[in-house]
Image: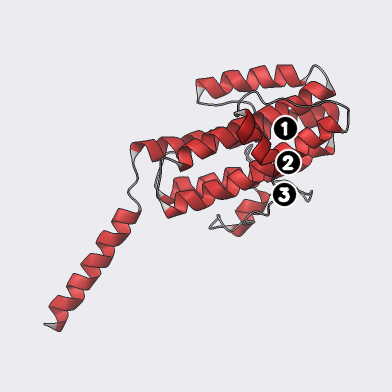
Amino acid sequence: MRTITFLFFISFLSFENLSANEISNSEKEGIILMREEEKLAHDVYRFLYEKWGLNIFSNISESETRHFNAMAYLIEDFNLADPALKEPGKFQNKELQFLYDSLTNRGSESVIAALQTGAFIEELDIQDLQQLMGETENATILSVFQNLLRASGNHLRAFTGQLASRDYEYSPSVLPASNYQSVIETPHQRGMGNGNCKNQNNCRNNRPDGKRYRGGRGNN
């Protein structure tokens, strides 16, 4: 009887573990989208840093590296095919490829245009994350997305603050005005650090282009 009970208990645990790792197609698509969207942010910010030399682009690009790796954790955890290409500025998602090309062209026009580009990217991230969070009840996915959402709010405030210091008032082009204002009025939020990554060393050091970075300050 004890053997039967033990085997039943093991089977129950296995079933529970399997269920925890089963996610819907929309959840899978959301993870894949955000993996490439975090790469988009990183690659655009690295491009703009090399173009204009503003530290905000360097700092936030390293933050995007951590988010990119956090999405790799979800891809590994749910056994999904990784869509991210190592080559900077290259994407499997054709819409993101078009967006990268458009944003780097736009951001090359002036420093103001570059900072506007950064704010636009963070608006887009916030919109997508809020929508995806409304489509899942998976605690693991929600934990990672919530961390990314806090950071995107910090980044949006950083970019709009840089614009304000140059006497330019940013107007949202993606988020509804009330949503945007709520984000802008929220104090700086601390993220969960590298807690979303199984391999702490990889989360600190691996960039979307497959290289490694040294030091630098991020914004979550």
Q: What element carries label 1?
A: helix
Residue type at tag 2: Ile
Q: Is residue 90 above or below residue 210?
A: above
Which residue is painted at 74% across and 25% down in the image? Answer: 116
Earlier-in-chain disc, 1 versus 2: 1
Q: Is residue 175 left or right of residue 142?
A: right
Mark 2 or mark 3, which has the lower sequence index? 2
Q: Nearer the viewer, mark 2 or mark 3?
A: 3
**What's under tag 3, amino acid-wise?**
Pro
* Colour scheme: secondary structure
What residue is rendered at 15% in x and 83% in y? 2
Q: Where is residue 174 in the image (x, y as percent from the top left)?
A: 61, 25
Residue under label 1: 45
Name the outermost residue toward the bottom. Answer: 2
In whole angstroms, how far apart are the C-alphas of marks 1 and 2? 7 Å
Q: Is mark 2 on a helix, strand or loop?
A: helix
Which residue occupies 82% across, 23% down?
Answer: 112
Q: Are marks 1 and 2 in contact (CB under 8 Å)?
A: yes
> Does residue 84 appear in this view?
no
Vertical relation: 215 (above or below) 169: below
Q: Which residue position is annotated with label 3? A: 187
Percent across and percent down for residue 51 are 81, 25
Give the residue type that dot 1 points to. Answer: Tyr
Label 1 to label 3: alpha-carbon separation: 23 Å
The answer to whether residue 170 is left or right of residue 211 is: right
Q: Sequence-wise, which precedes: disc 1 or disc 3? A: 1
Which residue is tagged 2? Answer: 60
